[in-house]
Each structure stands twice: as structure tokens, then as C-alpha cells.
Image: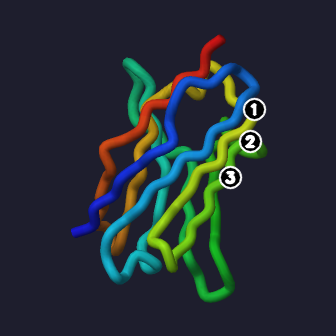
Amino acid sequence: QVQLVESGGGLVQPGGSLRLSCVGSGSIFRLYAMSWYRQAAGKQRELVARITSGVSGDITNYADSVKGRFTISRDNAKNMVYLEMHSLKPEDTAKYYCNANFRGEGFWGQGTQVTVSS
């Protein structure tokens, strides 16, 4: 079992920035593929970014809609994963969820709300 707790959401104006954080439990945190998903009102949950720790370093993937604006990173020593979000747009408004996946078994946090509005 992995417990995940997100933080850092809030209200931000278009063009602004936010940093989301997710802390996880467990001694094998580094083995988990960590992802950020988001779900806007009335829409399906979608993958935003994923990071895996490999032998040669971290591997990251992004949804096309956030490439160049969002950056995912992790600190395995602290069991943390982050999502730096810049140039935020109203369409980024959603509840953002942290996900940990190991050998097909996934765990979710409770989510943190991000609202982009003037």
C-alpha cells in the first residue's frame, strides 16, 4: 500500500504559475512510476505527466497540452514528486491527482484543486 497526499493547488490568474507537491509513503518509492493526472468538471481523468526512475536517470512524458509549460520531477530521498506549472490557462482548471504505479498496481491521492481564472 502507498498513501499519497497532494498539496499546492489554489486559485491563480491566467499566465501564472503553481507548484504541486505529492508525498508518498513506503520504502520502495523510487521503484514507482509517478504520475500527475487531472480531471476537469464533466470530463474524464487524463494523464498530465509521468516520471520513472531509470538506471540512466529519470524519464519523463507529458501530455501534448502541457508540453513546454509543465515540468514533473521527483526526489526519491524525500518520497516526493512535483509538478511545476507555468503559463497556466483557464483550460488547466481541474482537480490534480498524484498516482503511483508499480507492476500494474496503482494508488491515488485525494487530489488538489487548481483553478485558473481572472
Location of mark 2 (residue): 69
Label 1, label 3: how far apart the Cα atoms are: 12 Å
What numbered label is drawn on residue 60?
Answer: none
Q: Residue at x 37, y 41 (%)?
A: 111
Q: Residue furthest top?
A: 118
Residue at image point 40% right, 20% down:
41
Q: Is residue 44 above or below residue 13?
A: below
Q: Amino acid at mark 2?
A: Arg
Q: CA distance from mark 1 to mark 2?
A: 6 Å
Find residue 56 and report its image quarter: bottom right
- Residue 23 location, x and y as percent? 42, 61
**Amino acid marked by disc 1:** Ser
Of all residues, the one furthest to the bottom in this rendering is 55
Dot 1 lies on which element? loop
Question: Residue 94's spot in the image, x, y percent?
Answer: 48, 28
Depth check: give the residue in front, 27 or 38.
27
Q: Which residue is mark 1?
A: 87
Per the image, label 3 sits on a secondary structure element best described as strand
At x 21%, y 69%, the residue is 1
Q: Dot 1: few (<14), some (14–19), or many (≥20) neighbours within 10 Å?
A: some
- The image's colour scheme reads rainbow
* Spatial separation of the CA atoms under disc 2 and disc 3: 7 Å
Name the disc covering residue 71, or none: 3
Q: Are marks 1 and 3 in contact (CB under 8 Å)?
A: no
Vertical order, 35 against 70 (above or below) = below
Mark 2 or mark 1, which is nearer the start of the sequence? 2
Amino acid under label 3?
Answer: Thr
Residues at circles 1 and 2 in contact by the CB criterion of under 8 Å? yes
The image shows residue 40 at horizontal and vertical percentages of: 44, 25
Q: How many marks?
A: 3
Element on which disc 2 rests:
loop
